[in-house]
Amino acid sequence: MLRIVSYPHPALRYESRPILEIDDAFRAAVREMFTLMYAAKGIGLAANQVALPFQFFVLNLTADPEQPDEEEVYINPEIVKRHGSVEDEEGCLSLPGLYSKVRRAKKIRVRAYDIQGNLVERDVDDLLSRAIQHETDHLRGKLFIDTLDPLVLHGFSERIRGYELEYRQGQTQGLIPANDELLRRLGCLARPSPEGIFTEPGA
């Protein structure tokens, strides 16, 4: 069962590997991610936010499970062009309750595979452009707080320490495994396995 991990879980800094196969296990993970995203009232969720070290994310800008036609899956995404810049507010399901203005490209060209395995290239702007940039950063182990001015980030230092304290307390209580174990699991998942992409080799 997947769950959204919170900062500073090491999966959030783990650079994901490409998806090589779209199988039933992958489709099931995508469906579960949409369910988690809707429950958290989010519009996007990257695979490493559920501790899967793979290059894909899900989006539904309506955040409404009653609008499945708006669901999108981006597999092995690549932003090939960026135009202009604009600043707007962002948040993150792995940093719940923290929001800040973030400067992003206003318009981008993105290339990715869809859930049917078709290679798609699109020019997008506005909220969709921002969401794709945010989620693509996740797959590179980058969080939106990494883009903030040091003075702005300093203003969030108490909140960030709170996330870290809660995470360490979870580890102390045995609710969250030690980071060494989490990194071992991520490394095992990232290695190709004949049993499937979400199966630890030898498990």
Image (tube, rainbow, N blue to C red):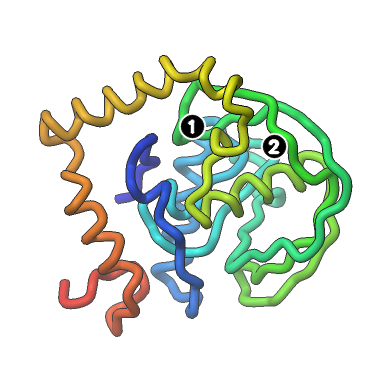
User: Which mark is on residue 56?
Assistant: none
Query: Residue at horizontal 19%, vertical 52%?
Result: 180
Lateral position of residue 137 relative to residue 190, left or right: right
- Give the SS element for disc 1: loop
Give whichever of 193, 162 is nearer the camera: 162
Residue 79 pos. (x, y %): 72, 61
Circle 2 Cα neighbour tier, 10 Å, few/some/many (<14 / 14–19 / ≥20): some
- Can you say whether 36 is above or below 118 in the image? above
- Alpha carbon distance from label 1 to label 2: 13 Å
Residue 126 pos. (x, y %): 82, 41
- Give the SS element for disc 2: loop
Give whichever of 140, 45 is nearer the camera: 140
Looking at this rendering, what residue extends furthest in the front direction?
Answer: 150
Query: Residue at horizontal 49%, vertical 32%?
Result: 40
Q: Quadrant of residue 116?
A: bottom right
Give whichever of 161, 191 is nearer the camera: 161
Residue 19 pos. (x, y %): 49, 73
Circle 1 Cα neighbour tier, 10 Å, few/some/many (<14 / 14–19 / ≥20): few
Lateral position of residue 158 relative to residue 144, left or right: left
Instruction: Return the residue at label 2.
Output: 62
Query: Residue at horizontal 36%, vertical 40%?
Result: 5
Instruction: Return the residue at label 1.
Output: 40
Number of dots carrying numbers:
2
Q: Amino acid at mark 1?
A: Ala
Residue 53 pos. (x, y %): 40, 61
Q: Amino acid at mark 2?
A: Thr
Query: Residue at horizontal 58%, vertical 50%?
Result: 137
